[in-house]
Amino acid sequence: MVGHIALLLGLTIFTASCATGQQDQPPLKTVRFLDLQRYLGKWYEIASYPAWFQKDCTATTAEYSLLADGNIQVVNRCRKERLDGPVDEVVGHAQVVDTTTNARLTVSFFWPFSGNYWIIDLDEGYQWAVVSEPRRKYLWILSRTPTIDEDTYATIVTRLQEMGYSRERLNRTTQVAVSATH
């Protein structure tokens, strides 16, 4: 329970986007358009910038589903300390704030705090995505599958470096293998 509360608090602080990031960078751009229906579903974290609210997390996933009011439910899960460790979960809500692109959202895991959730890179087939926030302090590379091929990963990282992100800060996330029956 304490871990769950720490994760909830951490995600709330993330969503508040209180920390400073790379101020000398040009403004962060998002993808031109995000088809929300295609973005919904389960995503596996492939790599991320370290965040204290994800301390000891592995096998991290995010699942997005459309709510009746048009907003999006966000369920973040991870395993604590090891692949067979206890599941830690937090549920939040996201709202599109830029309806021209749908790529800028605010997410809230704990009212009244909310913060930026921007899709800054996206595969044409919606097989991988990159999420960040305007200050570039947080970063996640997501995939529809628990792994991503190394050439694709290297291409994503190169593109991120061109946007002012540090390759050295990225940590790969260990994932649970998914059987063919899932």
Image (cartoon, rainbow, N blue to C red):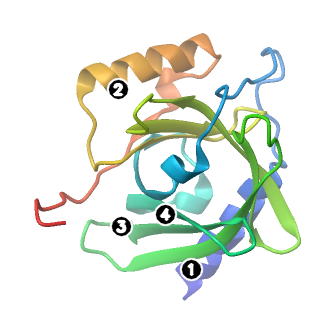
In the picture, the disc for residue 143 is none
Q: Which residue is mark 4?
A: 63
> Foreground residue, 117 or 101?
101
Asked whether, in this view, residue 151 is left or right of residue 43, the answer is left
Q: Amino acid at mark 2?
A: Tyr
Give residue 62's position: percent from left, percent from top: 49, 60
Pointer 4: residues within 10 angstroms few (<14), some, or many (20+)? some
**Residue located at (29% from left, 48% from top):** 145
Residue 50, compared with residue 80, is above or below; it is above
Q: Earlier in the sequence, mark 4 or mark 1?
A: 1
> Marks 1 and 3, Cα distance to the nearest angstrom?
13 Å
Q: Which residue is mark 2?
A: 153
> Marks 4 and 2, Cα distance to the nearest angstrom?
21 Å
In the picture, the disc for residue 4 is 1
- Secondary-structure class at tag 1: helix
> Foreground residue, 65 or 108?
65
**Residue located at (59% from left, 42% from top):** 35
The quadrant holding residue 160 is top right
- Secondary-structure class at tag 2: helix
Looking at the rendered image, the quarter that the C terminus falls into is: bottom left
Give residue 76's position: percent from left, percent from top: 52, 66
